[in-house]
Amino acid sequence: MTDQTELARLIRADSAERGQPVSKLGYFCAPFRPTSGPLADKVIKVYRGLSDVAALERLHQCHDDYVQAMYASGVGLPETEFFLLDIEGSRIPVIVQEALPADSMMRPLMMSRPLDETLVMMAAAGEVIATFWHWAQGVETRIGFHPSIRNFAYVDGRAVFFDTFPPLIHYSRDEMGKMLLTYSDKRLMRWVGPFLQKKVTGIQDEWYSPPETLVGLVGSACRLRPDDAEAYLAWGRDFAERRMQPWLQEALDGMQEPPRLPGYWTGFRKILGLQGEPNV
């Protein structure tokens, strides 16, 4: 069990003591890994605090439920804990997660390894996607999954999913749309977003659609390595026929050509300076 006193001290400490951020990506936070001490084997993710106590308590419960869902589905996660810490008069959501090897992040591996090795990684990630969605067919509450390449590590021949925020369980579509703004680490997103709430809300739709999560994975691979796009499309079609039968036609329809991100989302990424790095 994580020592919450030590955790709060680390969060208050200056950056040199906390350790360097392990990702530049800032959709919701900049995770860091302590350089020493009892939490040196953990990645710490600190999110924006809220004055709404009920909303924070619900977030805590939903996150706990989502972690349990990941384990129940057979997807699994690195050991993951959620805390609401009292820091400087605010209650701050904090996630503490077992650190994965720095050289296991799937995105840089996909960019640097030979094509045949990347297809093996895609197959491992695809198995995680199929496993989750076949399990989720029996779940009554609204539940989603965001298995992008940047949210996977590749360890000992298997894909390890590690992204649990926001927890894609229980929240309605409109509630999740508002969360994407509430917890954004980018002030500009929180300022501009409400004027574009409908489009911001639509960002999540892929995460709640089994075929679109597979299409999204393939699209990411095609954008990372455009010269190998046909190989990734062929893999995706074959995988859909073998493992995504309930959603086959929609998946195939999305992989007739290299999938593209919606124009409004690529625009948001440019405005906010978001990079496709691991969201650890």
Image (cartoon, rainbow, N blue to C red):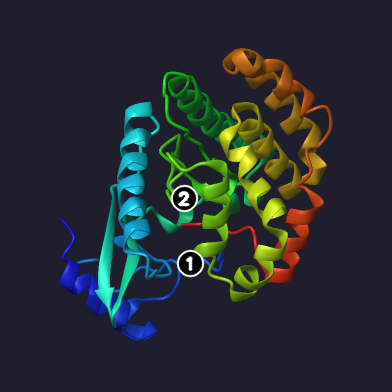
Q: Where is mark 2, residue-wise?
A: 104
Q: Nearer the viewer, residue 174 or 102?
A: 174
Q: Is residue 113 visible?
A: yes
Above or below 173: residue 254? above
Above or below 125: residue 48? below
Q: Is residue 78 visible?
A: no
Above or below 183: residue 227? above
Q: Where is mark 1, residue-wise?
A: 29
For the point 28% across and 80% down, which residue is it? 89
Q: Nearer the viewer, residue 8 or 35?
A: 8
Looking at the rendered structure, which numbered label has been put on residue 224? none
Spot occupied by residue 107 in the image (x, y as percentages of width and height): 59, 50
Amino acid marked by disc 2:
Ser
Above or below 189: residue 242? above
For the point 69% across and 44% down, which residue is it? 220
Disc 1, SS: loop
Give the CA distance from mark 2 to mark 1.
21 Å
Examine the image and state in which quarter residue 247 appears. top right
Q: Nearer the viewer, mark 2 or mark 1?
A: 1
Circle 2 crowding by C-alpha within 10 Å: few under 14, some 14–19, many from 20: some
Q: Where does the N terminus fall, quadrant-wise?
A: bottom left
For the point 51% across and 38% down, which residue is it? 145
